[in-house]
Image (cartoon, rainbow, N blue to C red):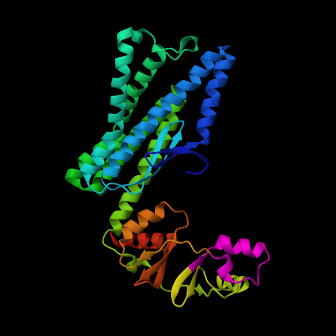
Amino acid sequence: MKNSLLIGRLAGIRIFLHWTFLLLLSFIVLAEVRRGSSTGTVLASAGFVLALFACVVLHELGHSLMARRFGIGTRSITLLPIGGITAPERIPEKPRQELLVALAGPTLNVLLALVLYLFVAPVGAFEGIGLSHGTVGPGFLTALFWVNVMLVVFNAIPAFPMDGGRVLLALLALRLGRPKATAIAAGLGKLIAVGFVFYGLFNSPFLVFIGIFVYFGAYAENVTVQHRELLRDFTVGHAMITNYLTLAPTDSVQDAANTLLAGSDQDLIVLGQGKAVGVLTRPLLMAALRGNCLTTAVAEVMSREFDTVEISDSLAKVYARAQRQPNAFYPVLENHRLRGIIDQGNLTEFLTIRAALSH
């Protein structure tokens, strides 16, 4: 996610901190200072926020590790003021797998709550959950206990794409199939999200942000699933562009600029002996032009690191891959030879045509 700081790795998964999280932490510290709280109380409050988000990380890690059992990797976990966002490499294909992945996060919070209960119950700490006198003691641990309880309760709400909504989707998908189940779960999620927004406008602004996040999350995932269903029976060969422009490694940057002007392509493939050896993207070309490198060979400014797809690859899987890469552009290969290209633009055009034909 953009505007996020990499703070470490856990179980091989990158953990990012969004810049808005720092605003939240600063706001809490400033509020305590303005109330005249002691340094110990300020530090305890900041520490509690960090502990709270550690619980969120563990929640998201529960999802990730369960997904890993089914061969699904996780690219990253990002911490936001409203919680955590896990970025899986793909969506579980089987409803049972999705059900277990959805339940894994809340289950970890249940385990954390049970462990904390063992510490706070014997000392009667449930009478007050404040962070008094800046100490990290029973009050701190009790508050953390209730945080985990609330994370379980809140995530149980069947508002897709929250965990409760994903559980509902998985159960519906066992009977109805994923596309129809997603449409139902997303519709319910958007309805609940609207309820969050209206209630939050008069009671809690924080719920407004939650509602907006849930609404657009449900909408985006439903669109993605419906699109993948439209592409399910097609391969890359059905949608690739076969009329494309190419360059040779020895062509100059000026030649590349002229080629770009001659067609509608935004990115150009560099061919050497009939094979794709590089990609000259529009940003790379513009950078070379700004550097007045008109006579420089394309081989010196092109990117030699680029993703490719096979002509027989599933179009639905390539679409899902392209969704994670802005301005996706892939040379299409068959037996290591270039056969075409596929990018976000012609994927969208193919989808538009399939959607029109399906009605």
Query: Is residue 123 located in the magenta-colored stretch of the structure?
Result: no
Horizontal side of residue 355 vs 168, given as left or right: right
Horizontal side of residue 67 vs 286, given as left or right: left
Residue in view at x 55 percent, y 67 percent: 327
Pick out the residue farthest to the left: 175
Pick out the residue farthest to the bottom: 273
Q: Is residue 99 above or below residue 114?
A: below
Residue in view at x 32 percent, y 40 percent: 104
Horizontal side of residue 166 vs 342, given as left or right: left
Residue 214 in percent (x, y) is at 44, 42
Which residues make up the magenta segment?
278-302
Looking at the picture, tell me which residue is in the foreground, 151 or 104: 104
Residue in view at x 51 percent, y 35 percent: 208
Residue 273 in percent (x, y) is at 53, 91
Decide if residue 129 is in sight here: no
Query: Is residue 296 located in the magenta-colored stretch of the structure?
Result: yes
Residue in view at x 27 percent, y 50 percent: 97
Decide if residue 325 is in sight here: yes
Residue 152 in percent (x, y) is at 36, 31
Looking at the picture, tell me which residue is in the foreground, 35 or 105: 105
